[in-house]
Image (spheres, rainbow, N blue to C red):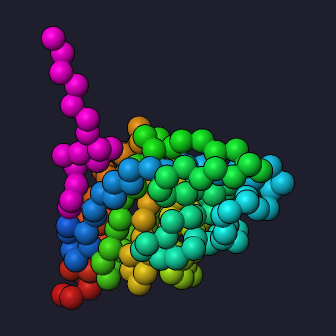
């Protein structure tokens, strides 16, 4: 008899810290993608504007692309929107630390330093499609497809080591 064991996307990979930056897996039990039929609103939900979330660390709704919002928590039931369960589709990793923007600048083709708390961008993270959510000063949640979790952690660790090495050289 085969016994299956449920694991998170980053099981056995995180947490990890290097050079004052930490990576922590965020396990979000329920995620649902909402796509309003009219393109702008869904009854009963206050959707944030393009490029924003409805908060920082405790955000419940994030803009997630043209006409799409990701809801953390139980499935909303608006009659005027399509809702799909995304709970097992995404990996979410938090990167936090004084040089976290420098680490992300090595991987993301966008100005990370311009992001303010609550900002969300859909972008490439190295070669992976993903999203970056600024949750506070030097704190970001990164979303990639679950199948890319190991690659995301590998790329982040490599960038963290590179930034730490550069910082070490600047103190000589």
**For the point 57% across and 64% down, which residue is it?**
62
Q: Is residue 13 magenta?
A: yes
Which segment did they paint magenta?
A: 1-16
Quadrant assignment, res 83: top right
**For the point 30% across and 57% down, which residue is it?**
25
Quadrant assignment, res 8: top left
Q: Is residue 150 magenta?
A: no
Q: Residue furthest bottom?
A: 171
**For the point 80% across and 56% down, which residue is it?**
39
Above or below — where is 102 with respect to 30? Answer: below
For the question of whether residue 51 can be seen, the reply is yes
Q: Position of residue 80 (x, y in %)?
A: 77, 50
Q: Quadrant of the N terminus?
A: top left
Q: Position of residue 76 (x, y in %)?
A: 59, 53
Residue 113 is left or right of residue 9, and the answer is right
* Front-most of residues 171 and 5: 5
Residue 39 is left or right of residue 73, and the answer is right
Q: Position of residue 31 (x, y in %)?
A: 49, 50
Q: Residue furthest top?
A: 1
Above or below — where is 135 with respect to 9? Answer: below
* Front-most of residues 145 and 123: 145
Q: Position of residue 171 (x, y in %)?
A: 21, 88
Residue 16 is left or right of residue 35, and the answer is left
Q: Quadrant of the C terminus?
A: bottom left
* Front-most of residues 22 and 46: 46
Above or below — where is 150 with respect to 59? Answer: above
Label total for image: 0
Q: Name the magenta segment's main secondary structure.
A: loop
Residue 44 is left or right of residue 29, and the answer is right
**For the point 26% across and 73% down, which residue is it?**
21
For the question of whether residue 101 can be seen, the reply is no
């Amino acid at each position: 008899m085969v016994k299956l064991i449920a694991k998170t996307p980053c099981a056995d990979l995180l947490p990890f810290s290097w050079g004052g930056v930490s990576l922590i897996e965020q396990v979000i039990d329920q995620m649902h993608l909402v796509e309003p039929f009219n393109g702008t609103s869904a009854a009963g939900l206050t959707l944030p504007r393009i490029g924003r979330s409805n908060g920082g660390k405790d955000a419940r709704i994030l803009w997630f692309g043209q006409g799409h919002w990701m809801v953390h928590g139980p499935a909303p039931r608006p009659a005027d929107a399509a809702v799909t369960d995304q709970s097992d589709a995404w990996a979410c990793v938090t990167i936090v630390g004084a040089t976290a923007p420098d680490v992300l600048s090595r991987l993301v083709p966008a100005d990370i330093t311009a992001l303010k708390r609550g900002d969300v961008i859909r972008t490439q993270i190295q070669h992976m499609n993903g999203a970056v959510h600024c949750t506070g000063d030097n704190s970001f949640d990164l979303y990639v497809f679950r199948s890319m979790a190991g690659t995301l952690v590998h790329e982040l660790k490599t960038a963290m080591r590179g930034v730490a090495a550069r910082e070490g050289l600047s103190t000589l």
